[in-house]
């Protein structure tokens, strides 16, 4: 990663440490409600272990409910411990399952720091608004809780989103961290956490019926997951050819009908046969799976990708002209070149490269087949030119220097 990225990560670590020190030094240690602390810590940890995964690999955790309830009910130092415990348990689970999400050492400490920073800001807002609006009545308590929850969500998402901007070269919009879908879902969970805190103070047993809808949510999310499994390639997690073609046809027809730009990237791994022959087919499968992960991370929420045969991939870019499509293709190429894959048959991580061809509409293509053939030809030109490169879509400039969409 760049020096700028590391500087940002260490800055967040430092701010998190300062907030933790303040929580330890200013917190009360008399009349500690140990039952509340232990219960919420256990509930947050269990919630983090059970993920409800929606389509497009969006994971939902009930953890924010108990984190926000802990923020309101516990001493600041207890809240810090709650965050550290549940995040550490998630890290241990990933290590035991040999997962890839938290492989880099700095990810979980960064997540812990962002939770502590967002929690400190939300607690300060909650405390000061509560003092300022005394006596509390009517909607005032609800508004205070909602404002505190909004502050937590905005800070948490902004800190994580900017990290993705630096680490992956995306715009903040492309990360989706400040998108309405992500913000609203977390906001609703935090508001439920506020309700849990109120009920806990009345009678802890009241949280049982209040949490029962979570069972229905988890079960409801299973249905689209089953549908998605029928639409995706098992090895890469990208769309399988049948479903990809259907979506491609729909997007191409829409672009033609409304005269909107549409980009297509055809990508092929370089010398995968050498990987199979040298390190075995298991290593080849690991590389193929890694390609699916990298492509999924590099494209935007509006884009979709599919696996075309053994080591060839196709990526559709709605509302995208040549200039932006070329940038996305180059970003994918660079990410593939930088990736390292650990395989049991090699003492060192192996690396691969990818050749990509880009073509866009409007242009000469009259069908999806024409556009695929055009992008395929560009991809083979990249192969012939030495591989590990992008042959981009032509960008036409008119006399007034305005960029036109070309094929």
Image: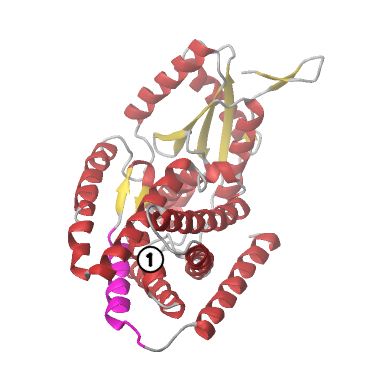
Q: Residue furthest right?
A: 399
User: As drawn, is 58 to the left or to the right of 157?
Assistant: left
Where is residue 186 drawn, in percent x and y? 40, 52
For the point 81% across and 16% down, which residue is it? 400
User: As drawn, is 294 to the left or to the right of 281?
Assistant: right
- Can see residue 350? yes
Residue 46 among those drawn in magenta: yes
Secondary-structure class at tag 1: helix
List the residue tagged with mark 1. Answer: 67
Which secondary structure is most common in the magenta stretch?
helix
The residue nearer to you, when weighing 178 against 392, is 178
Q: How many marks?
A: 1
Q: Which image quarter holds the C terminus?
A: top right
For the point 60% across and 71% down, which residue is it? 15
Q: Which image quarter holds the N terminus?
A: bottom right
User: As drawn, is 399 to the left or to the right of 12?
Assistant: right
Residues drawn in magenta: 31-50
Question: How are the residues colored?
Answer: secondary structure
For the point 46% across and 46% down, which residue is it? 291
Q: Quadrant of residue 199?
A: bottom left
For the point 47% across and 41% down, which residue is it? 180
User: As drawn, is 91 to the left or to the right of 178?
Assistant: left
Where is residue 335 drawn, in percent x and y? 57, 49
- Can see residue 391? no
Residue 87 lies, with reference to residue 21, above or below; the image says: above
Residue 232 among those drawn in magenta: no
Residue 194 lies, with reference to residue 174, above or below; the image says: below
Where is residue 303 drawn, in percent x and y? 48, 33
Q: Residues within 10 Å of mark 1 (few under 14, many from 20)?
A: many
The residue nearer to you, when weighing 160 against 317, is 160
Q: Quadrant of residue 140?
A: bottom left
Where is residue 37 drawn, in percent x and y? 32, 77
């Amino acid at each position: 990663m760049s020096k700028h990225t590391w500087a940002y990560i260490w800055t967040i670590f430092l701010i998190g440490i300062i907030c933790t020190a303040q929580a330890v030094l200013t917190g009360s240690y008399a009349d500690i409600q140990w039952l509340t602390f232990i219960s919420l810590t256990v509930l947050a940890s269990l919630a983090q272990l059970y993920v409800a995964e929606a389509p497009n690999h969006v994971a939902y955790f009930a953890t924010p409910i108990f984190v926000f309830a802990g923020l309101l009910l516990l001493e600041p130092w207890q809240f810090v411990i709650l965050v550290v415990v549940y995040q550490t348990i998630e890290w241990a689970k990933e290590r035991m399952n040999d997962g890839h999400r938290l492989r880099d050492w700095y990810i979980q400490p960064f997540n812990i720091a962002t939770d502590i920073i967002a929690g400190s800001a939300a607690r300060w807002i909650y405390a000061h608004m509560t003092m300022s609006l005394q006596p509390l009545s009517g909607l005032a308590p609800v508004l205070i809780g909602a404002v505190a929850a909004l502050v937590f969500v905005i800070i948490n998402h902004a800190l994580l989103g900017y990290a993705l901007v630096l680490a992956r070269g995306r715009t903040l919009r492309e990360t989706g961290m400040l998108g309405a879908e992500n913000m609203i879902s977390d906001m609703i969970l935090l508001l439920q956490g506020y309700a849990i805190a109120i009920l806990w103070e009345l009678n802890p047993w009241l949280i049982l019926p209040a949490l029962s809808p979570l069972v229905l949510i988890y079960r409801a999310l299973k249905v689209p997951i089953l549908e998605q499994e029928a639409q995706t390639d098992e090895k890469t997690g990208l769309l399988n050819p049948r479903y990809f073609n259907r979506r491609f046809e729909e997007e191409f027809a829409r672009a033609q009908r409304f005269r909107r730009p549409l980009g297509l990237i055809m990508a092929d791994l370089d010398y995968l046969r050498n990987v199979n022959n040298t390190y075995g087919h298991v290593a080849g499968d690991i590389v193929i799976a890694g390609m699916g992960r990298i492509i999924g991370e590099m494209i935007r929420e509006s884009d979709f990708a599919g696996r075309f045969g053994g080591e060839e991939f196709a990526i559709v870019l709605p509302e995208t002209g040549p200039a932006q499509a070329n940038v996305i293709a180059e970003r994918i190429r660079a990410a593939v070149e930088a990736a390292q894959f650990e395989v049991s048959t090699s003492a060192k991580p192996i690396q691969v490269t990818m050749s990509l061809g880009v073509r866009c509409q409007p242009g000469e293509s009259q069908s999806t087949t024409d556009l695929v053939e055009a992008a395929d030809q560009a991809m083979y030109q990249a192969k012939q030119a030495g591989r590990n490169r992008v042959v981009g879509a032509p960008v036409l400039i008119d006399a007034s220097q305005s960029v036109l969409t070309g094929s």
